[in-house]
Amino acid sequence: MVSVRLCFDEHGTYSNPKGEDEIRNILAHPGALVWLDVDRDHLGHLKPFDDLIHLHPLAVEDAESPHQRPILNRYDGTIFLVLYELTMAEGDNTIRGFPISFFVGQNYVVTAGH
């Protein structure tokens, strides 16, 4: 499932799109800004937006990996970045890291994590 975390239409007005068609309509405007979040195991849920959100196949492959190292690459106008979210495990006080992938385009941000 794709979640909309933040969305501003082409006029800079906050929007809360419901459904794929509304998201597509907003993404179609270069002046809009949409932040979508998806589980890294379900990046295929972004398929309906392929013509508006350009995810390079190598970046998608990296984003799907639960052990991807931190990285910064540029692919055809999209920036791909992997950072780690650090959390403290309850009970044993160990720190665990989980990769979060960012795809940043002209008018969108897509995050993919665990």
Image: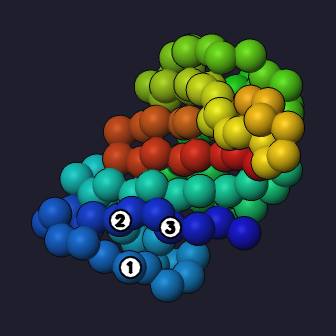
Q: Residue at x 46, y 45 (%)?
A: 109
Return the residue at label 2.
7
Q: Position of residue 73 (x, y in %)?
A: 56, 15
Q: Are marks 1 and 2 in contact (CB under 8 Å)?
A: yes
**Number of numbered labels in the structure image:** 3
Q: Position of residue 95 (x, y in %)?
A: 74, 30
Q: Residue at x 18, y 71 (%)?
A: 13
Outermost residue toward the left in this view: 11
Q: Are marks 2 and 3 in contact (CB under 8 Å)?
A: yes
Return the residue at label 1.
16
Q: Are marks 3 and 1 in contact (CB under 8 Å)?
A: yes
Distance (Cα) linking label 2 and label 3: 7 Å
Amino acid residing under circle 1? Asn
Q: Position of residue 7 (x, y in %)?
A: 35, 65
The front one of 40 and 97 is 97
Where on the picture, by quarter, is residue 77? Answer: top left
Say above or below: 74 vs 6.
above
Left or right of residue 67, residue 29 in this image = left
